[in-house]
Image: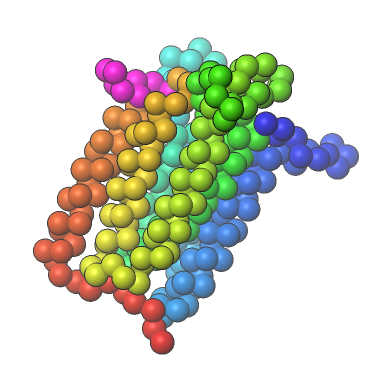
Amino acid sequence: MYNDIFTIGSITIHGYGLMIGIGFVCAILVGAYRGKRRDLDINVIIDIALISIAFGFLGAKLLYVLTDIRHFFEAPLVVLGSEGFVVYGGVLSGALSAVIYCHRKKLSFISYFDLLIPSVAIAQGFGRIGCFLAGCCYGRETDSILGVVFPSGSIAPAGVKLFPTQLFSSGGDFMIAGILLLFSNKLKYKGDSGALYLLLYGIGRFVIEFFRNDYRGSVGMLSTSQFISIFTILIAITLFAVNKKRNILADKVVV
């Protein structure tokens, strides 16, 4: 909506970057607090968070480039310099970097994945508020009272009422985080928290795509993210079955 929050001299603080920064700080603080209660190494938690953040950014940008590859070849610097990211690329690359880290350190990736996945949802929630401030990831035109008019200078089309899909997504992400935090100590098997996140996010992302109007590639009648969401949901269901078969109890709060 209004991406330039304030300016000090030649430095301008942008809402998009500010919200992402706040999200990451909150995510690490929540992860460290929950890790301490589960007797997990806080230094490892911070390492995984920082590594996942770095590679998550790269992966999210890479998938964004792939969804707009023609424009990238025409104007690569414009695409790379834009605020466009695809969350699925960030989740995949962030998780992969965490897997490699845990493997090298001989740690249980699933334990830290279950621990940090609510933090991922929290960071995404703040990130979507940043999207709203910047005007990216905008929705379709609407006459609904829910519609929002973006000013000129935003990434979103100005002067018309649009669904604030960024805020819908943000609310959904925070809701997912709340569900994961509420049920994290009630889920029976190790890996169930991660599977629950993938299931909820996959369903939510598939639905919200019907209301978005920023083109980021397509596969047949589906957007790229909807296509990926189908596999995300199937992976989540498979993980629930695998977790039950492995029969390894989830980490609980240490009293």
The residue at the point 39 percent across, 79 percent down is 253
Spot the residue most to the left. Answer: 245
The residue at the point 63 percent across, 53 percent down is 22
**70 or 144: which is nearer to us?**
144
**Image side of residue 143 versus residue 189, left or right:** right
Instruction: Specify the quadrant that holds the N terminus.
Output: top right
Residue 173 appears in the figure: yes
50 over 33 or under it: above or below: above
Magenta residues, start to end: 216-223
Instruction: Specify the quadrant that holds the C terminus.
Output: bottom left
Res 185 quadrant in image: bottom left
The residue at the point 52 percent across, 66 percent down is 30
> Which x, y percent locates residue 39?
41, 80
> Which x, y percent locates residue 52?
45, 53
Spot the residue most to the bottom. Answer: 255
> Which x, y percent locates residue 203?
32, 40
**10 or 148: which is nearer to us?**
148
Residue 72 appears in the figure: no
